[in-house]
Image (cartoon, helix red, strand yellow):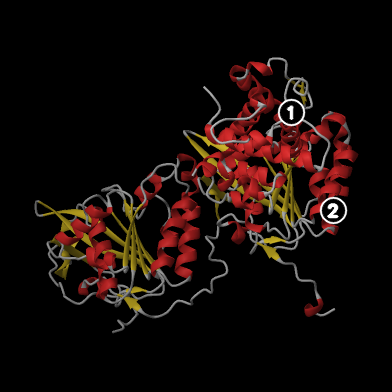
Amino acid sequence: MTAAPGMRDLAHRLLTYEAVAAKTSEPAESATLRVYEKLRQSLSAFAGVAAFESLAFRALTQAKSEASGLWAVQVAADGSLRGLGESEPQIDIDKDLPGGFPAGEGGIILIARLLGLLHIFLGEALTASLLRVTWPVEVFDDRNSAHGRNA
Amino acid sequence: MSTQEKVKINKLPTGVPGLDEIVGGGLPEFSFNIIAGAPGSGKTTLAHQFVFANATPERPALYFTVLGESAIKMLRYQQQYTFFDPAKLPDSIRFINLSQVVLEKDLGAVLEEITKEVEKANPAVVVVDSFRTMVRKPQSEMDLQTFIQRLALFLASWQATTFLIGEYAEEELRDNPIFTVADGLFWLRQTAERNSIVRKLQIIKLRGQDSVPGLHTFRITNAGIQAFSRTFGLTARKRNPPGNRRLSFGIPELDKMLDGGVREGDSVLIAGSSGTGKSVLATQFIAEGIHHGEPGIVAVFEERPEAYADRAASLGLDLETPQKEGKLTILYLRPLDLSVDETMQSILDAVQKIGARRLVIDSLAGFEMALSPGFRADFRESLYRMIFALTGIGVTILSTVEVDESFTEFPFSTYSISFLCDDILRLRYVSIDGQLRKIMVVIKMRGGNHAKDIREYEITSKGVVILGKRLTNYQSLISGIPIHSDRSDSTDEPLLDAGIEHKT
């Protein structure tokens, strides 16, 4: 079973947003790590480090079955991600085209899985509320989605 | 200092239907409260209802979770309640987890963390769930007390209304220094009685408020907690002094026996064995009220409303039309496991909804059977409270009760509730001339001048019809096995209490 298309799309939007932000303001860093770290900070404050670590571990296990490139990645006790930075390439926003995901497929899958778990446990409304604390509202505008761009 | 100069304590809505009445109109603003109880007793749900009712983006609620249930899991379940509005998160309601601080540091660090978040958010409501899990070593109970004292002082200064949620067993209630700090102490209990779960809420303490004492039933449904005040929300209602108006049964001879009818605001009991026509009389009473523009409620427990209306129709009484017109409600209260207060609340809601002036409870035996076994012990007391509350606002209540037919005694009720009733009408079978016939007698009429006659009646297609003459040529009629005597001075006029004139 693969990550739900809606979650992949949302993950892609978050990664794209962070990739753009990294190029314009902050030091280069894996977009996946940036998204993941923001989720970790936000969800650990909200639900506790242990709860986040459990979710992240589950998401990573699911993601590994889809993306073999994640085999070396691990979730630390504080919920942080280890082993991704070396293998995870930067998101190439120039390749941000509909119909396929750019480089960083494993990262997208991991984030999509994490968002998918939140969606399962908290539902759409609460998940969206939590994400809106961290990312600007336009990231969640459907017109910015792959589906929206296709239309 | 005059009364005008005293500080006014604002009362905040609890968000729990029925609880505002119990706490005396709302929860005192800036109060420091503890919600205590066993696991699964509804502590978190109660706190959530308060939070959702009061949090705003300008004055949000901070909900601190500690160890135990994670916020993700908690919210997964809590959002199933209808009061849960996801749009309130995170602007109005913010969840903050303190487990790492608790695990790695001490209570001082926890207080520091809470202080930091409170200063940042300026919340109107603060919840710590569960504060007991912060104590990881048994010997640090004293630390917890100091922590709570400092937390209470800090949060009161920051004008926050606070709830600490803690799991406590019943025996921990006594001499617990932590509870002395609290302005309000809410104790939630749930006990299994036979096959039923009985949930009760007690306001053990609430400073500055005139809360309703005692144990109040509550239920947890998909709407959250609903509390049922022991006073049924009628304490604030102005009591109507008993009037002199008489309410007719629509049976002229019976009205005569009752000195013109039942006094408005009375509680009437019709007692008799099966088939004596108790329900028929009750139906005639309610139909006559509707005929005179008095809305009515019939609470039935032993048959469905349709069957009740059909039976009335067979007596020529139309109960369908007034139901459609909102002048009559037939409540079917049969589900088992109801608490007596819940059942009575349903009746009260119906009474208040249509402005009912007459209420029929048919029957008390059915009412009792509809209750959860654990509540049957409270039946008589609760019935007393409801009758007192409803008659106090001028509603006239007619209850039917089945009594075992006995030929050695003449009981009025199996519930020893005759003292609750202003008027008692007793129906019974008698064996006369080889026939099983029916008689009725007014046993009691508080403040009234009722007939002492024993009258024979029949149930016809027009309902109860009292036969022409009082029975004078029999002795020991109420035994059910009368002895024929030679007297034959029957009269159509009812004989009233000696020395009291019949008022017309």
The image quadrant that residue B471 belongs to is: bottom left
In the displayed structure, B24 sits above or below B497; it is: above
Residue A132 picture location, percent across and down: 67, 46
Amino acid type at circle 1 is Ala
Amino acid type at circle 2 is Glu
The image quadrant that residue A41 belongs to is: top right
* Residue most extreme to the front: A94
Assess disc 2: are there few (<14), some (14-19) or many (≥20) residues with their C-alpha within 10 Å of its C-alpha. Answer: few
Mark linked to residue B275: none
Frontmost residue, B304 versus A114: A114
**Residue B464 horizontal side relative to residue B262, left or right:** left
Residue A27 picture location, percent across and down: 83, 36
Q: Residue at x 37, y 71 (%)?
A: B357
Residue position marked by numbered label 2 in the rendering: B119
Frontmost residue, B279 versus B123: B123
In the displayed structure, B204 sits above or below B316; it is: above
Frontmost residue, B204 versus A64: A64
Q: Are marks 2 and 1 in contact (CB under 8 Å)?
A: no
Q: Residue at x 69, y 41 (%)?
A: A17
Q: Is there any visible trace of residue A98 in the rendered image?
A: yes
Residue position marked by numbered label 1 in the rendering: A50
Frontmost residue, B72 versus B160: B72
